[in-house]
Amino acid sequence: MKTLNVPLGDRSYPIFIGNALFAATGALDAYIPGDEVLVVTNETVAPLYLDGLLSSLTRSKVDSLILPDGEKYKTLGTVELIYNELLAKRHSRETTLIALGGGVVGDMTGFAAATYQRGVNFLQVPTTLLSQVDSSVGGKTGVNHPLGKNMVGAFYQPLAVFADMATLATLPDREYRAGVAEVVKYGLIGDLEFYQWIIENTESINARSEAALEEMVYRSCQNKGDVVARDERESNVRATLNLGHTFGHAIEAVEGYRGLLHGEAVAVGMFMAAEMSRRLGWLTSDEVSALGRLLESLGLPTSVPAAMTPENFLNAMALDKKVSKGTVRLVLLKSVGQAVITGDYPEEILRETISVFCNQAVVF
Amino acid sequence: MKTLNVPLGDRSYPIFIGNALFAATGALDAYIPGDEVLVVTNETVAPLYLDGLLSSLTRSKVDSLILPDGEKYKTLGTVELIYNELLAKRHSRETTLIALGGGVVGDMTGFAAATYQRGVNFLQVPTTLLSQVDSSVGGKTGVNHPLGKNMVGAFYQPLAVFADMATLATLPDREYRAGVAEVVKYGLIGDLEFYQWIIENTESINARSEAALEEMVYRSCQNKGDVVARDERESNVRATLNLGHTFGHAIEAVEGYRGLLHGEAVAVGMFMAAEMSRRLGWLTSDEVSALGRLLESLGLPTSVPAAMTPENFLNAMALDKKVSKGTVRLVLLKSVGQAVITGDYPEEILRETISVFCNQAVVF
């Protein structure tokens, strides 16, 4: 087992990375301050891990709530189901919410914890690679709005994160690969050594070897924790974590969150950001091609879905949170391993990049 | 004009107390960091003050939203109207929300500000006495749930508060008096000198003299700011601000928020807390009687509505946020001017107090 600390002053918390973590009686208990617990999970994860988690808890009042599964349920209406359960079962402000599931469960449970009685305790037990390397770390919580993704939410840190490699064994292939996209992101934006490790280890990553899983999750959480500690509320450097996300969110929005998975959309978005960075003279053709090949070898998409047009793409981007004073601020790559956040680029280059991706496959 | 500072480190903010404050061009502008503003108000306040406020703002993008008026609209559904407006008008995370109205508008606008894109800027322009002396100061935001008042919310501080005495001139009598109840509370819990000032000035308070208004608002905000600075997230001393509120919330809940106004319910609740404190041997009969006469002279109720029974009263209290580990923690009075928070009392005394109030008028 490996342990990392996210250093945020009096809101610092540990991330435990290992095997069969939460099956051990007492592991989570040590991070539950009161006598009351509500475990929130979904209908896919519940049959696999809920009983194991519940039997490891020794608190006197343990309730659980099973939500429907899917990004389309990441709404205020679903969060209200959590409030309803907490109130129906009379949970006090000393209760602890445990999110058992992927990013959707974690984001909604975190938001419920941030807002139930103005804030209660919260633990993350992420069961997908994407949530282990990304959404469970850093305190972003929230839900989607019909007019935009993650438009309602709060910054709210958990008391601890338990990333159990055992849960990745049951993850469907497509979801696993979508998580790997965010892993590649950490290399691209700030950790060249890790990026090279990924290139050299695509086979063991694809085979989900235990050593590769632990290394991926550990290095990703380390990178994310460092960035979050420097800029918790995303005033500056934290925004680099959005590499590929502005492009990716536009794709997800146009597809009504029913097309590419988030990580897949981010993979396409990172490739678009790399191509735009090349057009700005920052990356070489070889570097962009190498990224394309890497994504392909990891089973990730590099071209935009057929539904995308230059018009709907740009329109969807204008609603993105990264819009500051009318300019679309983008995360781009000054070099492989070094991201920048900028709204200072010729708009023509952005339009050309989008146009090329919407009108033809990009060859690499 | 008087100015107070609420000292909360990097979240400190000023409270301006005076006449025709926001009509002066530039007064609010100085506290709006970006170019975008959404003013949120309600259908009662809008005809009186919205135009004046809007014409004082010089920002390039100024929108306004008029909500229905009333505590029954203090719901997540109404907060969604604010999100919808912000997204439809494409407000970025640099926008500033201005709450123009009473506590309901302030609590909902504050919660929308706390959660829109995980947090945007926020100004309070309270137009009722209750919101000027209480809800606009201290950062409590949120909405009601069918199973409990203020069960969903966040701690979120404004950038500034503008308490304009001119707006109190149009306040209906009952609402004004309900605000005075919270003023009395500050005296009872921690400011004996202020409590005596209130007793000596009931006439000018009832006449709404400008000097009395300014003094009431200033001293109340000073008391509240001090308490909030010592305990922002209500771990201990801040809970004394809930004197009368646990009893009061139970009354409001049983009446479905359609009976007594919040401040009126708090007045009854304070009187119940005083009577219970007497039964615990902490207050004299004379002190309880004097409080009863004071509340009466200020036009406030001292008996519980007919709908209340010992059973529904206790049941409603058990759902209150102040419940800690099964015990109903109450704010009581060790003496006039000194509140304590305690769950350590004979339950019989609580039951007797509630029973006496439900079954007969308390004579003073």
Image: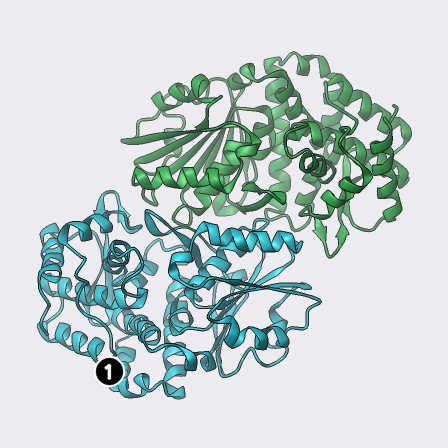
Chain colours: A cyan, B green
Which of these two is toward me, B20 or A118? Answer: A118
Which of these two is toward me, B173 or A222? Answer: B173
The image shows residue A22 at horizontal and vertical percentages of 56, 77
The image shows residue A317 at horizontal and vertical percentages of 23, 51
Does residue A360 appear left or right of residue B43 in this picture? left
Q: Quadrant of residue A309?
A: bottom left
The C terminus of chain B sits in image quarter: top right
Please determine whether, in this image, residue B130 is positioned above or below residue A71. above
The image shows residue A88 at horizontal and vertical percentages of 64, 53
Q: Residue at x 27, y 68 (%)?
A: A264
Q: Residue at x 72, y 16 (%)?
A: B202
Task: Say which residue label 1 marks.
Answer: A199
Does residue A26 appear left or right of residue A244 in this picture? right
Does residue A113 appear left or right of residue B91 in this picture? right
Please determine whether, in this image, residue B257 is positioned above or below residue A273. above
The answer to whether residue A146 shows anywhere in this view is yes
Does residue A254 appear left or right of residue B303 in this picture? left
Q: Quadrant of residue B223?
A: top right
- Residue type marked 1: Ile
Which secondary structure lies at badge 1? helix
Which of these two is toward me, B112 or A51? Answer: A51
